[in-house]
Amino acid sequence: MEQCLRLGRRGPQVRPFCEQARVRPRAYSLPLQRALVDFGADDSFLEAVKKVREHYGVEVPLAAARQHTLAHARAMGALRHAAAPAAKVVVTSMDGSMVPIVESGSGGDRRKGKTLLWKQANLCCARSADVVDCLYGATMASVKMAGLVWLEVATAAGLRPASAVHAVADGADPIFNAFLEQFAPWGPRAKFTVDYYHVDEHLGQAAEVIAPARKKAWLHRQHGHLLKNRSGEILRTLQKHFEPMDQAQTPVRDTHHYLNKRKHNLDYAGARAAGLPIGSGEVESGHTHVIQQRLKIAGAWWIIPNAEAMLGLRTTRANNDWNGYWTDCVKN
């Protein structure tokens, strides 16, 4: 039991132990906060409480794990990764991943009328062509706003005015337009390549109509045209098998439209000759270990500000800025 004293009959309370040990009642030391955030970054807040109890013998309430994890997550969202040395070529990508979101109802009692829905989190990654590990950035904002994050991540990965940019992503208009808007200053040194496997997926749908009995052979021939930059051959083949205009499902027409719209962004032969990727697998895998591993665990639903904060926390860990953040906390 702590000894508490009082100066005079009505004077202030004196707590000798707290003064000597430099602790405050119901406060959380920085090492304890770090432990809570460490566990809360990867598991549910309930699991974080259990692990603190198991590893440190400290009993903390669930609200504390949630409070400190989100508070530090917001602070980490403002952290900027130290820029890498200038890169000759920067490989980069952006893609979306759906996150479970809860929106409170209007009125006095926000617990009533809640809506559960899915909203897109946009993940960006970038690296120098001669390194393996990517840097990540993520936001719940629109794809247009995510473009700013995209440029920021590419800059941290070594993008400089003299660098070349090799972007690989889905050919969707919002992503393509974000690329054009952010990397316009690099002119012809910034090239956008449509993800090869997205193209293959569209061709697979067309093959079901054009050559259902010999789908594998038909696709193999189209893959050969793609890798030799002969997309015109594919477009002519597709055009011969257009569905009637009044048909509801038109996979051949849709595939033709998809390829024709991005026919100038299918330089797979050039990318392979330069040793550059033609698929967006790096950002696709990033969805799993950066976003989904924490934000899509069973039973987790987020309000958008908290989801945004957790994205900052997850990208800080993925970018190996975790120790630097806590070192700055100790100094400050």
Image (cartoon, rainbow, N blue to C red):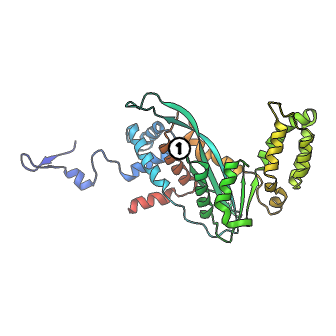
Taking the spot 56% from the left edge, 52% from the top edge, the residue there is 315
At label 1, the amino acid type is: Asp
Residue 96's place in the image compared with 125, above or below, is above
Would you name the residue on which mark 1 appears? Answer: 42
The residue most toward the bottom is 162
Residue 268 in the image, given as x and y percentages of width and height? 82, 56
Extreme front residue here?
Answer: 246
Label 1 neighbour load within 10 Å: few <14, some 14-19, many 20+: some
Place of residue 194 in the rendered image (x, y in percent of width and height, measured from the top left) = 76, 52
- Residue 255 as seen in the image, left or right of residue 321: right
Front in this rendered view, residue 312 or 58: 312
Residue ID at (85%, 58%): 269
Q: Position of residue 170 (x, y in %)?
A: 72, 48
Q: Is residue 216 left or right of residue 197?
A: right
User: Which residue is at the far top?
Assistant: 112
Residue 303 visible, this orientation: yes
Quadrant where the C terminus lies?
A: bottom left
